[in-house]
Amino acid sequence: MLMPQDKGPIDQTGEWEALQRHWESLAGRHMRDMFATDPQRSERYSLSACGLELDYSKNLVDEKAMELLLDLAAAAGLPAWRERLFAGDRVNTTEQRAVLHMALRSLGDRAYRCDGEDVMDGIRSVLARMRAFSEKVRNGAWRGHTGEPITDIVSIGIGGSSLGPKMACEALRPYQRADLRVHFVSNVDEAHLASTLESLDPASTLFIVASKTFTTQETLTNARSARDWLVRRLGGEAAVASHFVAVSTNAEAVAAFGIDTEHMFEFWEWVGGRYSLWSSIGLPIALAVGFERFEELLAGANAMDEHFLSAPLEHNMPVILGLLGIWYRNFAGCDSLAIVPYHQHLEYLPAFLQQLDMESNGKQVTRDGVPVSYQTGPVIWGAPGTDAQHSFFQLLHQGTRAIPVDFILPLCPAYDLPGHHDKLVANCLAQAQALMRGRSADEVRDEMAAAGLPAERIEALVPHRTFPGNRPSNLLVFDRLTPQVLGALIALYEHKVFVQGVIWGVDSFDQWGVELGKQLAGQILRVFEGDGASQGTDASTAGLIRRYQEAACSRQA
Ligand code: G6Q
């Protein structure tokens, strides 16, 4: 099929040029005035879907900008690419893979096929095993080697095999039980595993080794050390069977590690790491909050899939969010996007979205290998409010460059502690308002004059206390962070990233950029092990290798 990107680079299209011209024509327009002249602005630029409301009225857009952005999506062939994604075409072109994480949350209402084969039976069978296993652990029927019920679960995995479940378990903390704790170990730094194991009793600890390939250095190193710890403390290899399960696509490597494949939860090549929390990689979530809640999470994501597939582009939340990102990245020259959840339990959401977005769209060539002549994925970063207000918000308000912000806000509190939630909500709304409105020099003068400051002091302070405003933000609100809402929220960002990848013409589902560092780490490790030479290494790295080999800790090791 001839796809629109095959027609030539997107930045050579008339749609792109029209957007460029329109951005220039908006220079000098302030959002304050846009609000003042359009009482309907907030309704005009708001959308609801799957329990989420997106207010995107505090963006530097007018109706023409939105029309032109939608024209660009059409020029990039977004509807056709969306069809191909859901049809199981190999849209991950460089790895020749289909991308079907949506099938994992389809719950039977839509058939998904890979190479003509229905994938739903396999999914249902793994889900049934996850349900049975999680129920057994949660009701105490699954016992450790010495007959103890499980009180602590340690999930060992990294990147896509850790960030999603870790973020979701924390987000759903109010649904967790106090007597079943879930821990995540990812870093090969022994501090991570050692400090996690410190307070655990091996007799009641269950390890999940989560690795799609089951070859990842960090995960296997941590898993081996965890197994040694367990075997030493429980007195023999026989203990491994009741304390280790695996989540992987690689049964052979799981068996070679010493985990019975009866205790392995399968998933498939067509599930990308950063899109895998919906698969058996989500086992820690099912264990932490119960299988029904895990199904609710899947249902929320499924609802967003259906919305993405069927809503007209102009009312389609992932499309609108994606296009606004294109507007700022490619026409306004913004380099980054801040994610600021006003919910403490969404603490790990910025890190999760950082991987989702930056690994997917941090690309410099198109699917055909041609260097792009425009910017692609922005830097994604952030932290929860209100804490973030007391750290990086200064730069957002008065720094030299505009950084768009996604504010994420639950309208109802997760706990019943009076006197907090009003303040949380007030702060979030105030930050978005302040970024948009700013504060003019005259307002600063009036305020200081009213406070009785002398004229000279006022004039000295005016430049420091003036806020330019006109800084864009989205506000994503929902009632409560239920599993459904969380599912919809994650799927919203997944599809947003897809929309942007289609417009940029990149393969959003590969990650070759992580390879080189892995290879070089392997070479350096061989030098440490006396099985390789540092010849050919640059002087800086060679010097640091020597420095490490001479260090007291290295000689002791
Ligand atoms: C995600 C990436 C990457 C991957 C990790 C772990 O999309 O592919 O973050 O998830 O490298 O890989 P394994 O699951 O194979 O251990």
Image (cartoon, helix red, strand yellow):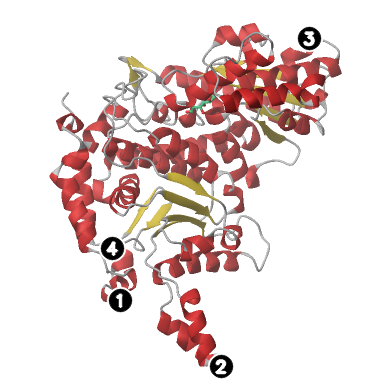
Q: Earlier in the sequence, mark 4 or mark 2?
A: 4
Q: In the structure shown, which secondary structural element does the residue marked by tag 2 occupy?
A: loop
Label 2 and label 1: CA atoms lie apart by 30 Å
**Residue at 36% from the left image edge and 63% from the top image edge:** 58
- Of badges 2 and 1, nearer the viewer stands 2
Label 2 and label 3: CA atoms lie apart by 78 Å
Q: Earlier in the sequence, mark 2 or mark 1?
A: 1
Q: Earlier in the sequence, mark 3 or mark 1?
A: 1
Q: In the structure shown, which secondary structural element does the residue marked by tag 4 occupy?
A: helix
Label 4 and label 2: CA atoms lie apart by 42 Å
User: What residue is disc 3 on?
Assistant: 237
- In the image, taking residue 121 as reference, residue 383 lies left or right, namely right
- Of badges 2 and 3, nearer the viewer stands 2
Label 3 and label 1: CA atoms lie apart by 72 Å
- Of badges 4 and 2, nearer the viewer stands 2
Asked whether the residues under the numbered discs 4 and 2 touch, taking CB atoms below 8 Å apart as contact, a structural biologist would say: no
Badge 3 amino acid: Glu
Q: Position of residue 550 (x, y in %)?
A: 75, 23
Badge 2 amino acid: Gly
- Quarter of the N terminus within the rendering: top left
- Of badges 4 and 1, nearer the viewer stands 1
Q: Position of residue 221 (x, y in %)?
A: 67, 19
Which disc is residue 110 wearing? none
Label 4 and label 3: CA atoms lie apart by 64 Å
Which disc is residue 36 wearing? 1
Confirm or reject: label 1 Cβ below 8 Å from ligand 1: no
- In the image, taking residue 394 as reference, residue 79 lies left or right, namely left
User: What residue is disc 2 on?
Assistant: 452
